[in-house]
Image: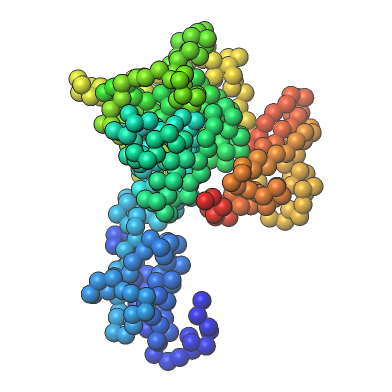
Amino acid sequence: MRPDSKWDRVGELKIRARLPSVEEIELELAEGSRASDLKSLVCGRLGIEPEATEILGPRGALAEGDSLEGLDSVVVDYLWARQMMLWGREGQSRIRNLRVVVAGAGAIGNELAKNLAMLGVGEQVIIDYDRVEESNLNRAIFFREEDIGRNKAEALAERLKEAFPLTRTLAINDRLEAIPLGIFLNSDAILSGLDNAISRIYLSQISRKYLIPLIDGGIIGSQVRVQTYIPPDSPCPACALPPGNYKDLAGLRNPCAPAGEEAKIPSLPTSASLAASIQAQELVKIALGYEEFLGSGSWPKAHGKPLEGVLIVDLDHNRYSVMDLKRNERCLVCGKGGLAEKVARRLKIALKGLKGIWDLEAALKSELDAEELIRLETLPSSAWGSLDPIEHLRSGGKALAIFKNRAGDYEEAVIESEWRDGIHAKLS
Ligand SMILES: [Zn+2]
């Protein structure tokens, strides 16, 4: 911010800044201001990051110390300007504010991480237990020869960071089942490229119970399968599995399991990138329309609607079809008596005026109409959040409340602040 006295000078500079096809703003700067002043003013007004922005004058990009003398209009060139032509500043800021889990750092995971970073997704938590092998390199864009033997999640997160410094990443080298719940609860969506039944069942369970959209993708050779699960009411990825043979399914390949347990399946770079491309675009629709969907029960027309059913692509025979899928009453995840039959409630709470934990607990009890509040967990992960629940919620974290309802049954509720105070900046 410039000292006020500078603004009092006569002969202020008036400059029009245009983000083509998105927005045009008018700015006033003190005489003697430099290009760096203009840039910070433009970025502040448009809510865009200076490190992803160039200001273009009549002779190209302005350098920081350039004089603004004689300049009356500039063009703002922002890293994500072309896609903002589709969904505006508001849409892009929703995408920038996303935190997503990428489950599996194999062929699909690499492509997902790349697409999400290019779209501008702010934070990716990448989970995989496996190690990079020579035969992964033909279809995993980020892995290099020297990564062989390294954990896939760690190698991917590090390479991604090098290529896309505006993406925050967190790598977790562990089995999915061992990941702290806070990692999932503090995410807006889960994208999986695991292609094995057990992990899909586990993620479907988390997704349904805690109402986190799941975009599942898989390939076998030249065949691609993508399913978008919007919990709790759409058919979950486990609905398509034959009921009653969980034990048989448990014998299938699990890429999150230690090396050696993995059976090899045929895999192509082309089908992996196609699956991940569709999955990433599904995430965009969720980012742009989910709030409205939650409020009104329908997706805003402007940005499309997530996939219903299961998309199956057979690249050998040029078949592109959406297979209809209905909720399976006997589904072992979302069916009657299923692992996640009961769904947590979801509550956005106003934090204004709450002075401490007692106020928060009283507000929750009243909002949930609870007989008794049993526990409130802030669920910070190693990367996020403060242990003070109000601070944690205020900074965009989620919490889990376990309470007894008026009928005497125990329930869970996912709590978040009515207003997110901005994207977390605590990841590496
Ligand atoms: Zn189901």
Residue toward you, 409 or 259:
259
Q: Position of residue 172 (x, y in %)?
A: 53, 37
Residue toward you, 49 or 328:
49
Q: Position of residue 364 (x, y in %)?
A: 72, 41
Q: Position of residue 407 (x, y in %)?
A: 76, 24
Q: How many marks?
A: 0
Q: Is residue 200 visible?
A: no
Q: Is residue 77 above or below residue 190?
A: below
Residue pictured at 44% horizontal, 46% vertical: 158
Residue pictured at 25% horizontal, 71% vertical: 60
Quarter of the image where one finds residue 241: top left
Quarter of the image where one finds residue 422: bottom right
Q: Is residue 412 above or below residue 21?
A: above
Residue toward you, 73 or 369:
73
Residue pictured at 48% horizontal, 87% vertical: 6
The reply, left or right, for residue 130 in relation to residue 318 is right
Q: Residue furthest left?
A: 317
The reply, left or right, for residue 159 in relation to residue 212 is left
Q: Position of residue 314 (x, y in %)?
A: 25, 22
Q: Is residue 57 visible?
A: yes
Way the structure is coloured? rainbow
Q: Residue furthest bottom?
A: 10
Q: Is residue 87 above or below residue 233?
A: below
Residue pictured at 74% horizontal, 32% vertical: 403
